[in-house]
Amino acid sequence: MAREQLKSLTEPMYYILLSLLNENHGYGIMQMVDELTDGRVAIGAGTLYSLLGRFEREDIITQVAEENRRKIYKITEKGGGILQEEYTRLNHLVEDGKKFFEFDGERKDPPDDSGGKKEETIPEAVAKEKVKTQVMQEDPKPKRSFGSLGKKGMLPV
């Protein structure tokens, strides 16, 4: 799992790596993340141990000890670099977001909302309506054509 493959970390990945800045075991990681995020982020055991195994295989974390059947992990230098890159990326997102919220200018090239059609002016719309009304007054009933069916809608006998 080289950094190229980890363009951005998932939330559980990020918090697990943060939790391993100091030595910690699996259950301790789950407790720490829950506590420090005020319960907003909960990492399930399946997700946690799957990611710990993956991180260990990729030398992102390393097991430093085992106490009472608990494996103790710590982030490696490689993992620290990945974590720092993610931290920087997230800070850029927040800073850029602030700029968007604070922006009070206008677009440099406002959109053409007409869909490519010239917007009709009020005088043009009124003139168009007059023409429609005049046509309806001249010929209020549409002409019906029965074709070969005759006036009663039946075929001639």
Image: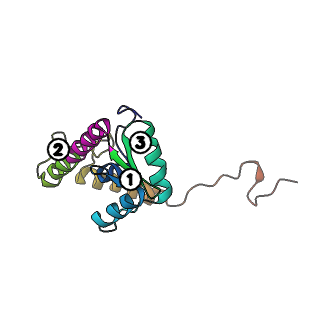
Q: Quadrant of residue 1?
A: top left
Residues under labels 1 and 3: Cα distance? Answer: 12 Å
Q: Quadrant of the C terminus?
A: bottom right
Tag 3 secondary structure: helix
Residue at 24 percent across and 50 percent down: it is 121
What span is in magenta? 75-92
Measuring from the top left, give residue 19's x and y in whole percent: 31, 54
- Three-letter amino acid code of the residue under disc 1: Pro
Measuring from the top left, give residue 153's x and y in whole percent: 76, 58
Q: Earlier in the sequence, mark 2 or mark 3?
A: 3
- Queried whether the magenta region covers residue 136, the answer comes back as no
**On residue 55, which mark appears?**
3
Tag 1 secondary structure: helix
- Three-letter amino acid code of the residue under disc 3: Phe
- Queried whether the magenta region covers residue 80, the answer comes back as yes
| Magenta stretch prevailing secondary structure | helix
- Three-letter amino acid code of the residue under disc 2: Arg
**On residue 107, which mark appears?**
2
**On residue 144, which mark appears?**
none
Disc 2 vs disc 1: which is toward the camera? 1
Pointer 1 residue = 12
